[in-house]
Image (cartoon, helix red, strand yellow):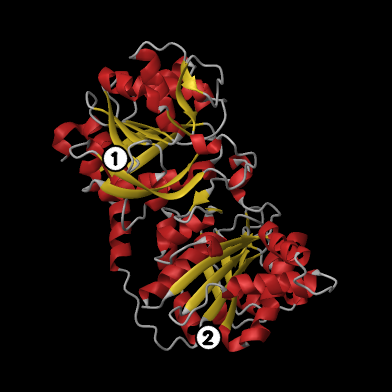
Amino acid sequence: MTKHIFVTGGVVSSLGKGLTSASIGMLLESRGLSVRMQKLDPYINVDPGTMSPYQHGEVYVLDDGSETDLDLGHYERFTRSPLSRDSNWTTGQIYQRVIEKERHGGYLGQTVQVIPHITNEIKKCIMRLASPDVDVIITEIGGTVGDIESLPFLEAIRQFSQDVGKENCLYIHLTLVPFLKAARELKTKPTQHSVGQLRQIGIQPDIVVCRTEQKLSKEDCDKISLFCNVPSNCVIEEMDADFSIYEVPLALMNNKLDELIVQKLGLTKAGQSDLTSWQEILQRLRHPEHEITVAVVGKYAKHKDAYKSIYEALVHGGIANRTSVRVIRIQSEDVDREETRQLLKTVNGILLPGGFGERGVEGKIEAVQIARENNIPFFGICLGMQCAVIEFGRNILGLADANSTEFDKDSSDPVICLMDEQRSIVDMGGTMRLGSQPTTLVAGSKAAEAYGTTGIAERHRHRYEFNYQYRDQFVAGGLSIAGTSPDGKLVEVIELNSHPWFIAVQYHPEFKSQPTHPHPLFRGFVAAAVEKRYGSSAK
């Protein structure tokens, strides 16, 4: 029978439940087990697609077009678990399903209540990932124990062990053990209170994972063990990673978390861990041969999680090139400042990520111009590609009014325009061009050279596209259309042949990059930045 691991969090938010869950998944996979990952989010939004990046961070898009929580990015970067829309459920989705069923008479006149109807629906969503070929399902519960909105999910996973048997369920609680500098000691009381709240709900954690800045002493572990009713060896230290988040799985393995899980769930088919490739990754990160500086010019640069996958993909590109990538986050609204413009001229690469809305776009366009005129390796993604098209139209083709109809509906030269199938859409959530779409690359292009093939599939999230009516004009002016949809109607990749490395794409390649398999375009971009700084001697 499929085993279930439920990961909850206490004391404070942003403890790293997603990273811890992903690390557990990776450790179990390294033992030869088949794992599926899932997150249950307590917010009422149907999905994060309409939420501000400043509140939620990036929206992570799956192959099937699901707009999901950024923690699913950790799942894909750390594990081989296939993800789908069944991998992320929100309160909004759960209630929507229950209400739709009630409207169609599905409850036969019953009074619909949180218990049992909402909790039953949550349990059904958990079970959707179960199958004979899946050994373990890891379900992360969003939010913090004690939050009102999390209670239905916690009640559901409490009931779950009664449904499938306690021997098939494991509860892991992630909590904070803060270090008070004034007292110069760790404090376990917040953890005691957090576990106490969980036990009041009816869930006794089997393992308590403690996030901490300082090492836990035996006395600390014994105190947590006593007050939280868990064996001392089930109190697991998870110190802040002082170098890279990719250290976390090895740290948890060194603290024997995977062995505990295997023993407690009776996973007899689990073999010995093989983390050779992961150790090689850390070796490359700790001992780079080069160092480069990349400017990420974005609308949401003030919020680090808004471009989480971008930053991680740059790290992966650095791993592939044995290079340390130093990222400078630049708010696109600040590019009009002289000091910012001068800073951009000194970096080894400029990357423009996606975004929506007019704010900061002119700064992005100016950043493109700086990269183009100074032969700085340039990588544009989604809105970044659209800004590159606008800049080329204005400054090379002389189309002074070149713009996107997203920003200027009355532009006389709408080089970027709303896709035809988007014109009649009113609802905002889940209605963009989403998910994996095929692209045909031009043989001999830099993109095809990076991928090593001319047929690819990448994940999309956009409403606007290159205006096909301007295609011949742009090509005649020196812009290369390096990739299109298979029917040739949608421009997916552009390049400048006169530039050392200038590639912009309409899709989001960052969503398919992993530390063990860096995305070809990020690998190529970092390689070009290395050559920009060191010349051919770096090869």
Q: Which residue is tagged 1?
A: 526
Disc 2 residue crowd, few under 14, some 14–19, many 20+, Cα 10 Å: some
Q: Which residue is tagged 2?
A: 264
| Whether residue 458 is situated above or below residue 36 in the rendered picture | above
Kind of residue indicated by mark 2: Lys
Position in image of residue 101 (x %, y %): 73, 66
Mark 2 to mark 1 CA distance (whole Å): 44 Å
Kind of residue indicated by mark 1: Val
Residue contact between numbered discs 2 and 1, judged by CB atoms under 8 Å: no
Q: Is residue 279 rendered to the left or right of residue 194?
A: left
Please tell me the numbered disc located at residue 21.
Answer: none
* Between 516 and 88, the one nearer to me in the picture: 88
Residue shown at 34% from the left, 14% from the top? 397
Q: Quadrant of residue 217?
A: bottom right
| Whether residue 1 is situated above or below residue 415 in the rendered picture | below
Looking at the rendering, in which quadrant would you find the C terminus?
A: top left
Q: Is residue 345 visible?
A: no
* Between 80 and 174, the one nearer to me in the picture: 80
Residue shown at 38% from the left, 52% from the top? 512
Q: Is residue 463 rendered to the left or right of residue 250?
A: right
Position in image of residue 525 (x %, y %): 29, 38
SS category of the residue bearing label 1: helix
* Between 183 and 167, the one nearer to me in the picture: 167
SS category of the residue bearing label 2: helix
Position in image of residue 519 (x %, y %): 32, 49
* Between 457 and 313, the one nearer to me in the picture: 457
Q: Quadrant of residue 310?
A: top left
